[in-house]
Image (tube, rainbow, N blue to C red):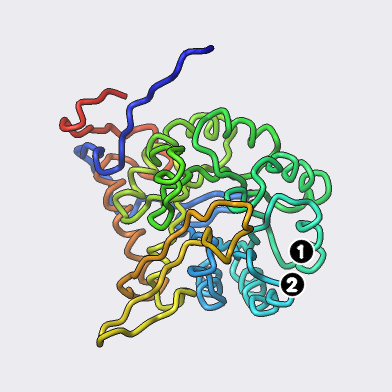
Amino acid sequence: MGPTRFYSRLDFDELSLIPQLSEISPEAVDVSFKFASRVYKHCPFLPSPMDSVVSPALSQEICRLGGIVTLPTADWDLNKWQDHYKTALYAQRNNAQLGVLLPPVPSIIDAWLEQVDGHIDFVALDTLHFQPHLHLTAIRHLRKNCSDLAIISGNVTEKDGALRLIDAGVDAVRVGMTSASINRGEQLTGCARSQLAAVLDCAQPCRDARIPLICDGGIASPDRAVKAFALGASAVMMGASFAATIESAAPLIQEDGDFYKLYAGMSQVGKISSELMAEGVSRRLTPSGTVEDLLSHWSSVCRIAISRAGATSIEQLHSKCTFEVSAITERRW
């Protein structure tokens, strides 16, 4: 029997970037995100492809702002695609990119792509709610039969997994598992990894291959996004922050004179196959402003933080920043 390996656990709140004496103004900081040969100047913040996050209104707004959006399809029939048809036109008109989240099953992938051919730019594979053992097979199928489409795949939490995805031919790697606020997979299975450690472990192989790393989960505030960028993420994927916006698919509910948005995990009973474990829960969120307000605020905070850290871009932040670890943790990493 081989040796058991142990790693120290470190979370975002235990880490800070050390400010530098900087002559860089926040306005000069580049927060662009490059994916599949295109550069997105203001949108390293991606909405999670969840049915309580992405609505036609939200996806059209993301595309209007020149960003990237992945449409959830877990409970759709092919006719529901028509509700999002205008989004495809917005994407084409605004140099945005539109993709669909599909299970790693070649027959389902083929059926969807036959219907949406010419209207999407990429496929994101969902391997948490469907058959994860088919993951690499699905990537190879897409590479062989749909070479013009980019592929986002994951989710992985360690460098060997990232390397296998890169070797299979993905265009971006989603990193993180069970770190979302509406996922209780760690409590149910004991199988999880801190989001910080997952990003840190996967960053080097992604940088070596010049493949963007999407930090998916655990990004509840702009400061966490900055720390993820500093650790090697190219973009962050958020659920709750987008779900709280006016345009999201999360229903607005009134109770006792107060309003809240109901943010629901996709991995719940009735939404997934009975063969899989229901890990998702629901949360009540305080309604926030618009998607544009959200992106403007998060971009502004990130520019300020990156300039204070002495860097001019997300990419440079990763190579220049210095961290301080909370002494309370008494850990080394």
Which residue is most to the front? 274
Is residue 143 rendered to the left or right of residue 235? right
Residue 160 position (above or below residue 39): above
Q: Residue at x 32, y 48 (%)?
A: 224
Crowd band around label 1 with a 10 angstrom C-alpha radius: few (<14), some (14–19), many (20+): some
Crowd band around label 2 with a 10 angstrom C-alpha radius: few (<14), some (14–19), many (20+): few
Corner quadrant of residue 6 = top left
Image quadrant containing the C terminus: top left
Pick the front one: 138 or 30: 138
Q: State the image coordinates of residue 106 (x, y, percent, origin top left).
A: 79, 51
Pick the front one: 276 or 139: 276
Is residue 42 rendered to the left or right of residue 36? left
Q: State the image coordinates of residue 128 (x, y, percent, origin top left).
A: 57, 49
Residue 258 position (above or below residue 145): below
Q: State the image coordinates of residue 303 (x, y, percent, origin top left).
A: 32, 53
Q: Residue at x 82, y 44 (%)?
A: 144
Q: Does the CB distance between marks 2 and 1 fall below 8 Å?
A: yes
Corner quadrant of residue 10 = top left
Which residue is most to the left? 328
Residue 199: numbered disc: none
- What kind of element bears circle 2? helix
Residue 112: numbered disc: 1
Residue 10 position (above or below residue 214): above
Mark with earlier residue (2, 1) = 2
Residue located beneath label 2 in the image: 78
Kind of residue indicated by mark 1: Trp
- What kind of element bears circle 1? helix
Q: Residue at x 68, y 76 (%)?
A: 80
Kind of residue indicated by mark 2: Leu
Is residue 239 rendered to the left or right of residue 37? left
